[in-house]
Every structure is written in C-alpha cells, then in structure tokens.
Image (spheres, rainbow, N blue to C red):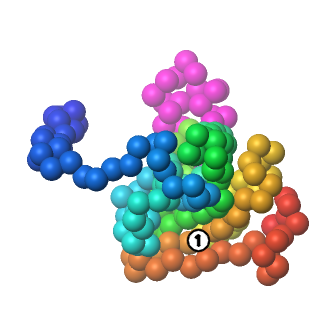
Amino acid sequence: MSAAIVREMAKYNETYTAHPPATTRFRDFPNEKAILILTCMDPRSNAYEFWNIGFGPGVLRNAGGRATEDALRSMRALSVFMANGKNTLGAVVVIHHKDCGLHHGPNFSDDFVRNKLAERVPERADEARKLWVGSFGDDVAASVREDMVIIMNDPWLPKDLDVLGYVHDSQTGKTEEVLLWNDKSPPKGQL
Ligand SMILES: [Zn+2]
C-alpha cells in the first residue's frame, strides 16, 4: 500500500518536468561558504518554510535532528567538496523541535524503540538493546546544546566553523536561538 502511495506521488513529476525549474550545475555553485541546517525529519520541522529559505543552505534531516555519525559524515564531505573544493562549510545550524517523536514520553524512549526492535529480531535482541536512538527529555535546548558540542568537537570540521542552535515550536512555528555560552566563543567541549 505504501509503495502505491509513493508511485501516486511520483506522478506529479510529469507535471513538474513539463516546465523544468531554472537550476545551477554543481560546478557553478556560488563561491561562498556553505550553510547546513540539521533538523528533524518530522514534516512540521521544515526550515525552508519557517525561515523562508531560498536556494542556498542545505538541510539535513534525520530523527530528532541529531548529530549522528552520518550527519557528521555529510558535514565533513560538504566542508571540502563545495564548488570543487573552493568552498568550505561556514555554519551548521542544529534545530530540534518541541513535540518531537523523539521526545521522551511513555511510549517514545530509547528503550521503547530498542525493545520493539528486539521483538522484531529476537535473535539479535542483545544488539538491539545497545542501539543508540537519541531520544531527549523536556529540555529541548539541552539536546540542541549536546549536538552543538559534538559538532564543535569534531576533529575533521573546519576550525572556524560557526555552530548555532535553535529550538522550533511545532505549534506556533516560532524558533528561538540556543546559546552555548554567553560568550559566543565557548570553550570547546563545555556546556
Ligand atoms: Zn521530531
């Protein structure tokens, strides 16, 4: 059933390509430092919409908008391959949102997910119970800070990278900046 829904959605592509949008080849991207936004895969957490972003910043989305190893992989790659290596990554913005599916609750905790996966694959239950899921508590700003610190401490990213954080309220659409430190250059590795 889900596959049929996807194929139905993909039919729009015929309409879309009837009048292709103006586009830029990768090698012609502007010679500016890249900005990358890391946010949740939740459809409400749409930075293009709530910040009215046009062509430019990339948006990386995963469950919770967490700074996972794979998110870091994308940041590292982007930091060297923009515009054939001329550019680098200027800023990463971590945005977590309220009412997120990864918010701790009676149902959605790391343990809930681990246990369900263990039930699904009982022969690998021990492995499932060690998986990192990345759920967070009531203090959404705390999880934003946690990920900001992970990104700031990544040894492979540019030393002058700006790392910013925001909490997005899914109900009102409002975003509020999260500062690590009053001083905008916090000591690395400290919350
Ligand atoms: Zn979410």
Nearer the observer, 136 or 34: 34
Please tell me whether mark 1 sits on a helix, a strand or a loop: strand
- In this view, the residue farthest toward the right is 187
Chief secondary structure of the magenta portion: helix
Q: Residue at x 48, y 30 (%)?
A: 119
Snapshot quadrant of residue 52 = bottom left
Snapshot quadrant of residue 187 = bottom right
Q: Amino acid at mark 1?
A: Tyr
Count the marks.
1
Residue 2: give x, y in percent of width and height: 22, 37
Q: Residue at x 47, y 75 (%)?
A: 169
Q: Is residue 77 above or below residue 105?
A: above
Q: Is residue 161 above or below residue 168?
A: above
Indicate if the residue with disc 1 has its beta carbon within 8 Å of ligand 1: no
Q: Is residue 164 rendered to the left or right of residue 113?
A: right
Q: Is residue 52 rendered to the left or right of residue 33?
A: left
Nearer the observer, 16 or 135: 16
Q: Quadrant of the N terminus?
A: top left
Nearer the observer, 159 or 60: 159
Q: Quadrant of the C terminus?
A: bottom right
Residue 115: give x, y in percent of width and height: 54, 38
Q: Is residue 173 rendered to the left or right of residue 105?
A: left
Q: Is residue 177 above or below residue 41?
A: below
Q: Which residue is mark 1?
A: 166
Residue 133 lies in the magenta-colored region: yes
Residue 125 in view (yes/no): yes
Q: Which residues are magenta?
A: 115-134
Residue 161: give x, y in percent of width and height: 73, 59
Residue 132 lies in the magenta-colored region: yes
Nearer the observer, 132 or 93: 93
